[in-house]
DNA sequence: CTGAAAGCGCTAACAC
DNA sequence: GTGTTAGCGCTTTCAG
């Protein structure tokens, strides 16, 4: 009765897919050797490896990642928390992260907060239950309880998009400087009555920072820094609406600095349709450097943020740490670039 | 020696976060009761539940999803395989899926095939190792070995975007009909020399199907159905390039039916910049119904596909099955809608 | 380079 | 409604 391993009652549930020990039996080795062949092929003799590979094919083995993660107390999951997928910016960041992680066998776990810090905390707490290898989240501001949790978190953590006082690592750019830079451009172009148009600025700290930078530059130049804000998500139509509202609220406005290219493009198209000359009647500027802004005529003046690079660099920071090395810098400033189109 | 559970040597690794039995001990119940309180609160008496909740807070318990998935041979993961994230269409589908799955506590595992069927198979095989609850993949065509695998797969599976002979469930639309519909519109508008402009049609079956529908309609009308194809991914600039190439290859062309709104919009903007009158000099049509096409003037004529609805419906099909019911229909046609802008 | 034993933390199955 | 027992399939640890 002690010895019938191959006919033992198999599993409680119906799924009787082959396991490591099925492969091991087939290959005539122990299951730990198969495990090694899978996780670190070089630690097994070439000949043994070959037998194991043949056995895997023969029995049709599919690796059970769940069991592996439980035993090692670590999955190959890396949660990535972003505030929105409606904003292309985050999609591009995700592409950068995914491309890099994929090469190293890590899988993203996507979380969408909808700009809610409460949701961010819930998501991260849930993801922690998956024994993630590392964590990527957006922004430097979190609920206090989450900040405490993350401060105690023992694995690589990158906060992306913004620059500042990060918990662990950080990849981003200064939105304050980006706003300042664009304002500087507008001022030096000779515009004096310049409006900033934003949306949902209470939940989006980066938008607020861009406005702050903008405002600082205008004040330096002795100018007012009026602000108009909307509460709907950024959208082409909102740009059109915003243009109309701006012109009626500030009839003598010369330039509008929009919080992103989507609104700016919507406004630009709407202005053209209304017969306004750009930039003579009204100058328009955006932020992000999205392709359609550059396809318009006049071409949109904007500040390009390197979205995919943020993703790649964040992933690289993590991979470096997972390989036991220390990245050269804990905080990476990806910078930005002013693109002067014909819209200003 | 038999009885010192609370001081036993805890865990092999440093991570000594509290476990279910810590909570159970604290609450004075058995761990299975805690498990029940977590998974099916109604199966536990209110009073017991309260004690357990207090204990969870007290010890700072974080649920280990990995262990749960191993024991139950099922995770709450649902892989979603898409060909690209550069195409907004798939991002919107993902948003629809995510919103619905999230409400039911399922987590998406995102896989990007880059239009490679080989990659699709690799991704799905890997994801299978996570004991997923269900599967969502794009298109009806797969590598044969994958089709075989999926046919044997015992859990809910939805193939999205296209309509046809699905393995299990199916949510999508007829791209053939969409192409046919747009061609019909152009023909009935009186255009006779109509070009179809596509990209990467060998890897993208849906684009091919739209062309087939287009072609069929033109042939019915006794017209030629010339096709121009590019190999780079769709992009605004490619639309501009395509317009120039089309005008030089077919100088007397009257209308161009683009495979998507991105190319069509790029062409439209480029045509306007060149001083061409739309639709008098050249009519332009797209596919998908993206917001920027509708923000242009002239507004882009296009066929709208309900992207987010595809995601929501696919998720709903799966949820229904997971709740033990049979969805009303195995295959859902989400349809499409012709939007006649001023570009045709 | 390979193996034996002992769990990882949870839930299925069956009692009571 | 709650408890006992026995794994889920893998990797860690410690030998050799």
Image: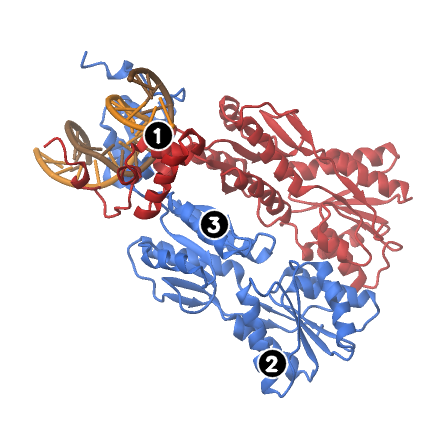
Chain colours: A blue, B red, C brown, D orange
Q: Quadrant of residue B90?
A: top right
Q: Residue at x 35, y 47 (%)?
A: B57
Chain containing mark 2: A
Quadrant showing the N terminus of chain B: top left
Q: Residue at x 56, y 69 (%)?
A: A208
- Find residue B109 and report its horizontal and vertical position in percent: 48, 41
Q: Which element carries disc 2, helix, strand or loop?
A: helix
Q: Residue at x 53, y 63 (%)?
A: A306
Q: Residue at x 58, y 25 (%)?
A: B168
Question: Could you tell me how many numbered marks the image carries?
Answer: 3
Give the label, 1 or 3, closer to the camera: 1
Kindly identify which numbered label has been placed on residue A25.
none
The residue carrying mark 2 is A184
The residue carrying mark 3 is A98
| Separation (CA) of disc 1 from disc 3 | 29 Å
Q: Is residue B66 above or below residue A139?
A: above
| B241 or A336: nearer the viewer | A336
- Find residue B240 and report its horizontal and vertical position in percent: 73, 57
């Amino acid at each position: 009765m002690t010895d019938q391993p191959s006919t033992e009652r198999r599993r409680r549930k119906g799924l009787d897919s082959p396991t490591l020990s099925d492969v091991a039996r087939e290959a005539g080795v122990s299951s730990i050797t198969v495990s090694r062949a899978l996780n670190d092929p070089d630690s097994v003799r070439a000949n043994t490896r070959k037998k194991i590979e043949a056995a895997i094919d023969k029995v049709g083995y599919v690796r059970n990642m769940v069991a592996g993660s439980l035993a090692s107390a670590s999955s190959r999951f890396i949660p990535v928390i972003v505030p929105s997928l409606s904003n292309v910016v985050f999609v591009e960041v995700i592409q950068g992260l995914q491309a890099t992680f994929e090469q190293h066998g890590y899988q993203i776990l996507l979380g969408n907060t909808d700009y809610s810090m409460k949701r961010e905390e819930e998501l991260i707490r849930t993801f922690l239950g998956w024994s993630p290898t590392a964590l990527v989240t957006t922004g430097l501001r979190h609920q206090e309880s989450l900040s405490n949790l993350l401060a105690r978190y023992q694995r690589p953590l990158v906060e992306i998009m913004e620059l500042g006082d990060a918990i662990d690592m950080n990849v981003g750019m200064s939105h304050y400087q980006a706003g300042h830079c664009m304002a500087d451009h507008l001022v030096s172009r000779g515009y004096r009555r310049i409006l900033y148009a934003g949306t949902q600025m209470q939940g989006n700290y980066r938008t607020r920072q861009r406005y702050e930078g903008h405002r600082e530059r205008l004040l330096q130049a002795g100018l007012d820094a009026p602000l108009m804000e909307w509460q709907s998500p950024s959208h082409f139509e909102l740009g059109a609406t915003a243009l109309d509202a701006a012109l009626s609220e500030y009839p003598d406005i010369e330039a509008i600095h929009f919080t992103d290219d989507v609104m700016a493009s919507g406004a630009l198209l709407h202005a053209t349709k209304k017969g306004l000359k750009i930039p003579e009647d009204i100058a328009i500027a955006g932020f992000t450097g999205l392709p359609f802004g550059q396809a318009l005529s006049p071409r949109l003046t904007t500040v390009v943020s390197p979205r995919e690079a943020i993703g790649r660099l964040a992933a690289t920071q993590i991979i470096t740490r997972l390989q036991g090395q220390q990245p050269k810098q804990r905080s990476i400033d990806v910078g930005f670039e002013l693109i002067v189109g014909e819209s200003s």
